[in-house]
Structure formats: C-alpha cells, structure tokens
Amino acid sequence: MKRSSYFLIINFALLLFNFSSCKKDEAIHDHTALTGLFKVEFEHSFDGAEFSFDSTYIDAQGDTLHFSKFDYYISNLQLVKSDGSIWSQPDSYFLIKSSDDLSRLISIADVPVGDYTGINFSIGVDSTHNVSGAQTGALDPANEMFWDWNTGYIFIKTEGTICTFFQASVFEYHIGGFQTANATNCVHKVSQTFGGSTLTIAPNTAPQIHMAVDLSRFFNGTSDSLSVASMPMIHDPGLEAVKAANRFQEAFEFEHLHQ
C-alpha cells in the first residue's frame, strides 16, 4: 500500500507539472494579449461640401458635375510606430466605394500593441498583384475594377454627367497603370502623421483613424486641373491618367483620432 501510494503521489505531481507547463506554453503562444485592432474611416467631400450622389458640384471651369460612381483601391497599409519602425499589414487590399458606407470603414486586426504616430498606404494595386492571375475579395474581377492581364486593375473609377452652357454629356475616368515605362505608373503612396496625437493599440480597444478625402482634388490639383468638358474620358494608362492619379494623391488628409 505504501509503495502504491508513493507512485500515486508521484504521478499526481507529474500531472500537475505538465498541466502547469501547458498553461504557460498556451500563455506564451496566446497572441490575443499582444495584439489589438484599429479602424480607418474615409469621409468623402467635394471642395468642402459633403459628397453625395444626390448633389451636383461645380468644377474649376464652372461646369456642373453629377456623379454616379467614385470608387478606388487602398492597399499596402502600414502604421508608423513612435520609435520610427514600421508595421505592415500583409495582403491589405480594400475597394472603397462612395456608394457603400461599409466599404469606407475598414477594420485592421492582429496589430502589435504599442503607440503609433502615422499611417501609410497606397492608392491603387501594386505590380505583383496586377499580374497574379485570378484573385478574390476586393481584387475579384467581378468588382468591375479590372481591365485585363496586361493593363491590370483600375485604381480609380469615377463616372457621371457634366452640364455645360451648351449641353449635357457623360464623363468616365478609369485610372490605372502599374508599369513604370512611359510614365504609366499610377500607384501612389500616401503618408500622414497624426498631428502630434498617438494611436495606442491595446487589447480590447478599437481606436479609429479619420481620413478626410476631398474628391474634387481628382479634378483640381495644386499643379494642374482637368477640364471635364474638354476631356470627358480617360480609359487607358498614360500621361493623362498619371496626372489624374497625382491630383488624387492630394485628396487624402488626416483629420482626427477616436481613441
């Protein structure tokens, strides 16, 4: 009996040790305590006025614009930590649609805890994913943001009607191009600091970055502007597409944080 009791005690002690070790191992590999999430909201306006498909807007030439579509890709999202290091979200591709409020609020999970002072992202789709074959999600060709395997994705698509003094007509701008030759690379990077504020990522919180997007910048930039009446259509990569992408890069501005 004594010998049996002795082995019983030893086995029970080993069982407790193994259980304790498993719990410690689980704690080590439990990443939920080491990461959090944040959200980014893109709020659209047009030259200071709230953007709506029910409204009309005046361009730099004095003509009236009415929109039926304004969609664009956001990709390769990064956060800048307070120490200057960069966290990059893998495979981050989002189709922002002005007609879909849900698409304009994106949620990013599995972000390392810490303090961040800025955000980077690209407008458009990088060259790797332009030539990666059939894809899903935001990059699904069914979203009608894809030309073909040679020219790749449409990065920005806006359509509508323009009313001039003489007549009303349609406009269509399908902006894309990922090759650097012949000035057709329309992928642009946006980098914004949080204006001295800090985005703190922690478990069980969901801070939100608010980005203001002035869609009028697509037409009226700091260096040039587009006359919709004179050029109502761009459907191919090229110099005019690059100019439009350059202007649209200016549309994005950090506004505030909800911590």
Image: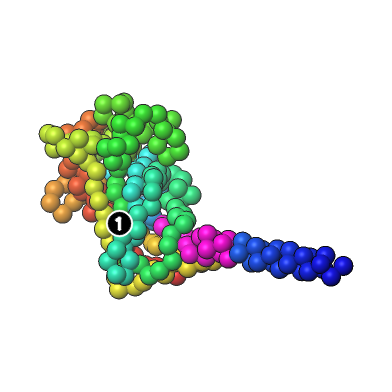
Q: Residue 49 lies in what quarter of the image?
A: bottom left
Question: What amino acid is labelled 1 in the image?
Answer: Asn
Give the x, y percent position of residue 30. 54, 61
Q: How is the image coloured?
A: rainbow
Looking at the picture, tell me which residue is in the foreground, 129 or 52: 129
Q: Residue at x 26, y 26 (%)?
A: 150
- The reply to whether residue 178 is in sight is yes
The 10 Å Cα crowd at callout 1, few under 14, some 14 to 19, many 20 or more, is some
Q: Please check the rendered image and state whether residue 55 is part of the magenta-colored stretch, yes or no.
A: no
Quarter the C terminus occupies: bottom left
Q: Is residue 71 left or right of residue 30?
A: left
- Residue lying farthest bottom? 196
Q: Residue at x 14, y 34 (%)?
A: 181
Instruction: Find disc 1 in the rendering and name its residue.
Output: 120
Q: Which range is magenta? A: 23-41
Give the x, y percent position of residue 22. 61, 61
Quarter the N terminus occupies: bottom right
Looking at the picture, tell me which residue is in the foreground, 12 or 169: 12
Q: Residue at x 29, y 47 (%)?
A: 123
Give the x, y percent position of residue 162. 28, 38
Q: Is residue 93 above or below residue 87?
A: above
Give the x, y percent position of residue 105. 45, 53
**Quick one: SS at disc 1?**
strand
Q: Is residue 138 left or right of residue 231?
A: right
Q: Is residue 246 above or below residue 139?
A: below
- The reply to whether residue 240 is in sight is no
Query: What is the number of callouts on the image?
Result: 1
Q: Residue at x 20, y 48 (%)?
A: 247
Q: Please check the rendered image and state whether residue 31 is part of the magenta-colored stretch, yes or no.
A: yes
Looking at the picture, tell me which residue is in the foreground, 252 or 135: 135
Q: Is residue 169 left or right of residue 54?
A: left
Q: Residue 146 lies in what quarter of the image?
A: top left
